[in-house]
Amino acid sequence: QVQLVESGGGLVQAGGSLKLSCAASGRTFSFSNYAMGWFRQAPGKEREFVAVITWSGTSTSYADSVKGRFTISRDNAKKMVYLQMNSLKAEDTAVYYCAAGPSGPSVRRGTVNIWGQGTQLTVSS
């Protein structure tokens, strides 16, 4: 059974930093073959793309709203993907989801094969 499990969410003050982690598991899951992304969903809003990293880790892409503040990275040996979030704003408050897909552009478009269950980030102003 393939699973993505997010962790690291919580409550942080505006201007602060937090790092989310996503652990992939599953005997049949070839983590290094997938592009990995982060999405978020705020209350009353649709889920939106945040960031994606290619299978090799050599290319990343970000939503304009987080560009320059968030950094996505991965460790294929550990089957982990991370989202370092700096200069957090109240509008970053959302449930953050880890996702695996066939390619960077596909994930960015929302073509996702596997979703995590989400982790809550709350930024207080």
Image (cartoon, rainbow, N blue to C red):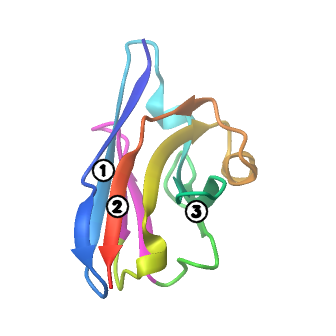
121 above or below 1? below
Instruction: Choose top left, top right, bottom left or bottom right for residue 24.
Output: top left
- Bin the neighbour count of mark 3 within 10 Å (Cα to Cα): few under 14, some 14-19, many 20 and up: few
State which mark lies toward you, 3 or 2: 2
Left or right: residue 113 compared with residue 30: right
Task: Indicate the secondary structure of the residue bearing disc 3.
Answer: loop
Three-letter amino acid code at the position of disc 1: Ser
12 above or below 83? below
Q: Mark 1 — residue?
A: 21
Q: Main secondary structure of the magenta part?
A: strand
Task: Indicate the secondary structure of the residue bearing disc 2.
Answer: strand
Q: Which residues are magenta?
A: 69-84
What separation in Å lies between label 3 and label 2 (alpha carbons)? 25 Å
What separation in Å lies between label 1 and label 2 (alpha carbons)? 12 Å
Q: Mark 3 — residue?
A: 59
Does residue 123 show up magenta in the picture?
no
**Which callout, 1 or 3, points at the residue further toward the start of the chain?**
1
State which mark lies toward you, 1 or 3: 1
Between 97 and 51, the one lying in front of the other is 97
Q: Mark 2 — residue?
A: 121
Image location of residue 55, percent across then percent down:
54, 45
Between 72 and 41, the one lying in front of the other is 41
Left or right: residue 24 compared with residue 30: left
Residue at image position (42%, 67%) is 93
Residue at image position (40%, 59%) is 73
